[in-house]
Image: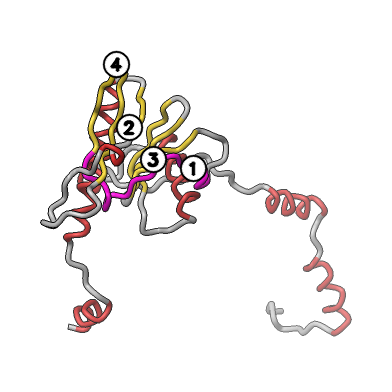
Amino acid sequence: MGLWAGSFQEGELASVSPLCSWRSPESESRGQRYQRTQAQRVRKPRCCTGPQGLLPRYSESQAEGQEQLFKLTDNIQDEFFIAVENIDSYCVLISSKAVYFLKSGDYVDREAIFLEVKYDDLYHCLVSKDHGKVYVQVTKKAVNTSSGVSIPGPSHQKPMVHVKSEVLAVKLSQEINYAKSLYYEQQLMLRLNENQEQLELDS
């Protein structure tokens, strides 16, 4: 007799279906354990741009810096993380639009900022020494200039932040000036509007 030669009766089908749908308690417990066991994140996400647009090697401190930046900017995606430096009682967070000096703490919000300088207002950053102490001096631009040329602002527009070593101060000033130069390069780039992009796609 062939496999499909006979036909099941209604009673036979009724007796077979419970067997097909039955699952052992062991398999159910395994399924429940699988649902409860989810992969835990091994490290914090990090997405930043290094020199020449390359993604640098993973750094836990940079991942934490990016997380801090998202908290400060409410997850605004057009401001990118560049670098972070932790210095004793504060940290310096450098983004693609501004540099933030933050008081150290478990929770970061805008109240932790004690100095914020946007690159539009920044003339330059340099290392300064006074009475044997080393500082990072963030020089802002003069508010109004008749010639339209950027010049350093007066002394009250040159805030200084104490740094524990000259080596670290030099590193900070270089990173801030580098981020500022990247910002102005981005401003000079030509950007296609949506209509131009659509025309290029259609052509």
Quadrant in which the N terminus appears: bottom right
* Mark 3 residue crowding within 10 angstroms, few (<14) / some (14–19) / many (20+): many
Front residue of 68 and 194: 68
C-alpha span from label 1 to label 2: 32 Å
Q: Is residue 84 above or below residue 38?
A: above
Nearer to us of marks 1 and 2 is 2
Point out the stretch of residues depicted in magenta.
109-124
Name the residue at 42% across, 30% down: 86
Report the mark closest to the observer, 1 or 3. 3
Secondary element under disc 1, as helix, strand or loop, is loop
Q: Earlier in the sequence, mark 4 or mark 3?
A: 3
Q: Nearer the viewer, mark 4 or mark 1?
A: 4
Whole-Å distance between the Cαs marked 2 and 4?
14 Å
Q: Which residue is mark 4?
A: 131
Mark 4: give few (<14), some (14-19) or many (20+) Cα within 10 Å: few
Judging by the rendered image, the residue that carries numbered circle 2 is: 160
Residue 139 rendering spot, x and y as whole percentages = 25, 40
Front tag of 3 and 2: 2
Q: How far is mark 1 from mark 3, CA to CA?
A: 17 Å
Q: Are marks 4 and 1 in contact (CB under 8 Å)?
A: no
User: Foreground: 70 or 17?
Assistant: 70
- Can you identify the residue that label 3 sits on? 93
**Pair 4/3: label in front:** 4
| In the image: residue 157, left or right of residue 102 | left
Q: Crowding at label 1, few (<14), some or many (≥20) Cα neighbours within 10 Å?
A: some
Q: Amino acid at mark 3?
A: Leu
Quickly name the residue at label 1: 44
| Amino acid at the residue labelled 2 | Met
**What is the x, y in percent for residue 12?**
85, 78
Q: Amino acid at mark 4?
A: His
